Amino acid sequence: MMAEELLVNNAINGMLWSALACLIVLIIATNNYILSLVSVVCVLGVVSSSLAICYYLGWSLGFVESIAACMVIGLSVDYTIHLCNAY
């Protein structure tokens, strides 16, 4: 039980730190604050909608779901950064 609580806390911390890192990298790379903020909001929207679907399906945020949440965070940040940089 304690390991699941730690995984949930790590998933939440990962979301916050990746959003902050994404914002800093995009501001440096694009020199456009508006585009950077829109991109970070997009990342947070993807992650929150993925977790909302898990909640509505009745899944608790356990071991597998927290690992999947970290993967969703990484993939959404990666995709958004490349798309924003190309724009």
Image (tube, rainbow, N blue to C red):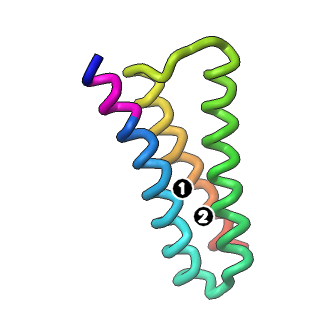
State the residue position of label 1. Answer: 78
Residue 82, disc: 2
Magenta highlight on residue 4: yes
Location of residue 59 (image quadrant): top right
Local crowd size for mark 1, using a 10 Å CA cut-off: few (<14), some (14–19), many (≥20): few
Using the image as rendered, state which of residue 3 and residue 72 is in the foreground. 3
Q: Are marks 1 and 2 in contact (CB under 8 Å)?
A: yes
Location of residue 2 (image quadrant): top left
Q: Quadrant of the C terminus?
A: bottom right
Q: Main secondary structure of the magenta part?
A: helix
Magenta highlight on residue 34: no
Three-letter code, disc 2: His
- Disc 1 and disc 2: Cα gap in Å? 6 Å
Q: Is residue 30 above or below residue 76?
A: below
Element type at mark 2: helix
Highlighted range, magenta? 3-8
